[in-house]
């Protein structure tokens, strides 16, 4: 089955700096790669996703890049703000009956004011 | 359009009791997923269901855990004879049928926090 690895496990940045979180996946059939943000005691919320036919996607301060050859994808947050502090999870899923998401282990992002 | 609805939000059970967690998917969604999140850990896939059919239960423990999604009513995750190690947040998520709408995208409910004492 799919295996997703995520690094780093913790990340502290100064407000206004950029944050980058990286994930690798094992199943070359995976074609969908979402990122979720989870605040303490809350549900995971989808913040951005990318499909395998696209190399990069951007939404305001958030961008995701995908390298299918190397089987890795990254989340980039620019101009970080204290409210960006949360745990971020990457995930991967495949087509058809394999469409359930396999999650990375999470990155605790802390934005220092 | 209501999101994924889970209840109860918090549940306390004594060791050996049964826990039943319910999930109603988003309107128009026909697929339901259950994930477990242990304290300060990631989300682990448990089971993937559509109406009256279990598609993938590869993440379900072999004993004491079962899930269903009947033709009418919510999906139910049932844990029999709970033990302390079952204490976790259980998240339900839903998605449209493959090829419909946003495809693989899944949306999570607020979770059910189970505490076994």
Image (tube, grey):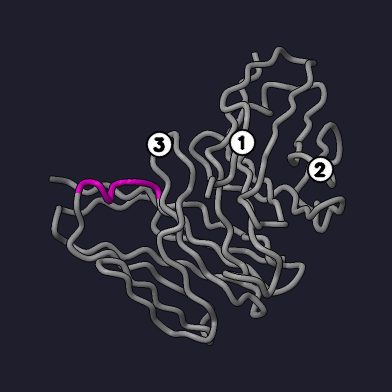
Task: Identify residue for label 3.
Answer: A40
The answer to whether the residue labelled 2 contacts the one labelled 1, judged by CB atoms less than 8 Å apart, is no
Q: How far apart are marks 2 and 3 (CA)?
A: 33 Å
Stretch in magenta: A82-87
Q: Position of residue B62 (x, y in %)?
A: 85, 41
Q: Nearer the viewer, residue A48 or B29?
A: B29
Q: In this view, does A62 lie to the left or right of A23?
A: left
Q: Which of A58 and A109 is in front in this view?
A: A58
B112 relative to A64, above or below: above
The picture places residue B26, in percent across and down from the top left corner, at: 61, 50
* Residue pointed to by mark 2: B72
Name which quarter of the figure residue B76 lies in: top right
Using the image, name the chain to which the residue with label 3 belongs: A
Please, is residue B57 above or below residue B85 in the view? Answer: below
- Name the secondary structure under disc 3: loop
Asked whether the residues under marks 2 and 1 belong to the same chain, the reply is yes
Disc 1 designates what residue? B6
């Amino acid at each position: 089955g799919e295996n997703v690895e995520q690094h780093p496990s913790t990340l502290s940045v100064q407000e206004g700096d950029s944050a980058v979180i990286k994930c690798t996946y094992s199943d070359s059939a995976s074609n969908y790669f979402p990122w979720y943000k989870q605040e303490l005691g809350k549900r995971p919320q989808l913040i951005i996703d990318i499909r395998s036919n696209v190399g990069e996607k951007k939404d305001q301060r958030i961008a995701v890049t995908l390298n299918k050859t190397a089987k890795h994808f990254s989340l980039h947050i620019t101009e970080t703000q204290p409210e960006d502090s949360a745990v971020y999870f990457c995930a991967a899923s495949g087509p058809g009956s394999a469409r359930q998401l396999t999650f990375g282990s999470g990155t605790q992002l802390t934005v220092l004011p | 359009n209501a999101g994924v609805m889970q209840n109860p939000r918090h549940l306390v059970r004594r060791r050996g009791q049964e826990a039943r967690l319910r999930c109603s998917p988003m309107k128009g969604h026909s697929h339901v997923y259950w994930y477990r999140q242990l304290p300060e850990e990631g989300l682990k896939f448990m089971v993937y269901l559509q109406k009256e059919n279990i598609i993938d239960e590869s993440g379900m423990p072999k004993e004491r855990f079962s899930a269903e999604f009947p033709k009418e009513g919510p999906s139910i995750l049932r844990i029999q004879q709970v033990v302390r190690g079952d204490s976790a947040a259980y998240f339900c998520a839903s998605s449209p049928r493959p090829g419909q709408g946003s495809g693989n995208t899944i949306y999570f409910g607020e979770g059910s926090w189970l505490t076994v004492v």
